[in-house]
Each structure stands twice: as C-alpha cells, then as structure tokens.
Image (spheres, grey):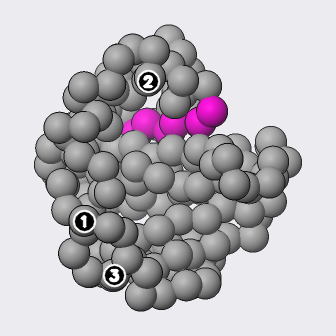
Amino acid sequence: MIKILRADISDLELVKATRLESLRESPDTFTSSLEIEQEFTNEQWLERMARSQYFLALDGETPVGIACCIEQDEYPNNKRKLVSMWIDPNYRNQNLGSDLIDDAINWAKENDISEIELDVFEKNLGAKKLYEKKGFVMTRDNNTFEGYPGFYHTYVLKV
C-alpha cells in the first residue's frame, strides 16, 4: 500500500535519492538538472529542507513519488511554491500525484498557508490536467526560463 510521508530532516537521504531519480528519469520536466543537484552538499540539502516541506509517496520503504512546498524569498509568509512534483513511471495513473497534492494542501491549511503557486511546462499535459482538476487556476502563460525550450504556465491555488 502506498502512503504519503511528510519528510523531515531524518529523511534527508530518501529525499535526496528520490529527487535525484526524478531528475534522471524526467530531465525535461524540471528547470534544474541531475548534474547540478547531484553536486549539492549535505549542507545545501539541509538548507533546502529547512525552508520546505517535502512529501514522499512510499511503496513500503521505497520512494515512488515526491513533491515539495518551498518558501520563496519574494513570497509573503502565507504563500508557497509547489516544486519537484514527480511520480515513478511504474506508478503513474494510480492517483499518486493527486494524493501528494492533497497532502500538500492539507499541510498548507495546517500551517496557515493560503496560496500555493506552481509552474509547469506547456507540453506536460498530464500534469496540467491534474493541477486543474485539483483546483489550480492558470494565472500566467507563455513564460520562458532562460536555457529551456518552450513555454511554461503558472498556476495558483487558493487554499
């Protein structure tokens, strides 16, 4: 049975391994890369975890999905960005993405977060469909990231 874990510092190695696997398996889905993040020091990972809440989908003890709500310097205290969303290809189409988002929304409510924002590349139709189903509304389209082909869209959910 799949369970969602709200990761803490003791889960650092699971978070690292899952994030790096997501970058290896789906390099065109993220604005970072395996080459960049595999060079992060433990201190950098710990700093990232200190300003984030990671959610891991676990099949037993094996991570099969990840999502993260992270503080952004330019955001007010009641807003977070949903990043690093990924499901192992062998577990897709089993509602795990929905489960991760549901737990992120519940966490946001428990922590007085009233808005979650995310970016998704326009070609990632499955993700866009999921976000819209979960109540996210597109607020900007046809944005670009330097060095990445294509456009991305920004979505927001009022919690």
- The residue carrying mark 3 is 151
- Badge 1 local density, few (<14 within 10 Å), some, or many (20+)? few
- The residue carrying mark 2 is 45
Question: Residue, x 40% and y 53% (percent of image)?
Answer: 85
Judging depth in this view, the residue of 41 and 159 nearest the camera is: 41
- Does residue 56 show up magenta in the picture? yes
Question: Residue, x 39% and y 28% (percent of image)?
Answer: 15
Instruction: Tell me which amino acid carries mark 2.
Output: Trp
Judging depth in this view, the residue of 69 and 94 nearest the camera is: 69
User: What range is drawn magenta here?
Assistant: 51-57
The answer to whether residue 104 is visible is no
Camera-near label (3 vs 1) is: 1
Question: Residue, x 52% and y 76% (percent of image)?
Answer: 154
Instruction: Tell me which amino acid carries mark 3.
Output: Phe
How many angstroms separate mark 3 from mark 2 (CA)?
Answer: 28 Å
Image quarter of the N terminus: top left
Task: Mark 3 or mark 2: name the one nearer the start of the chain.
Answer: 2
Task: Mark 1 or mark 2: name the one nearer the start of the chain.
Answer: 2
- The residue carrying mark 1 is 147
Instruction: Tell me which amino acid carries mark 1.
Output: Gly
| Prevailing secondary structure class for the magenta stretch in the rendered image | strand
Q: Position of residue 115 (x, y in %)?
A: 74, 63
Judging depth in this view, the residue of 43 and 7 nearest the camera is: 43
Is 8 located above or below residue 29 in the figure?
above
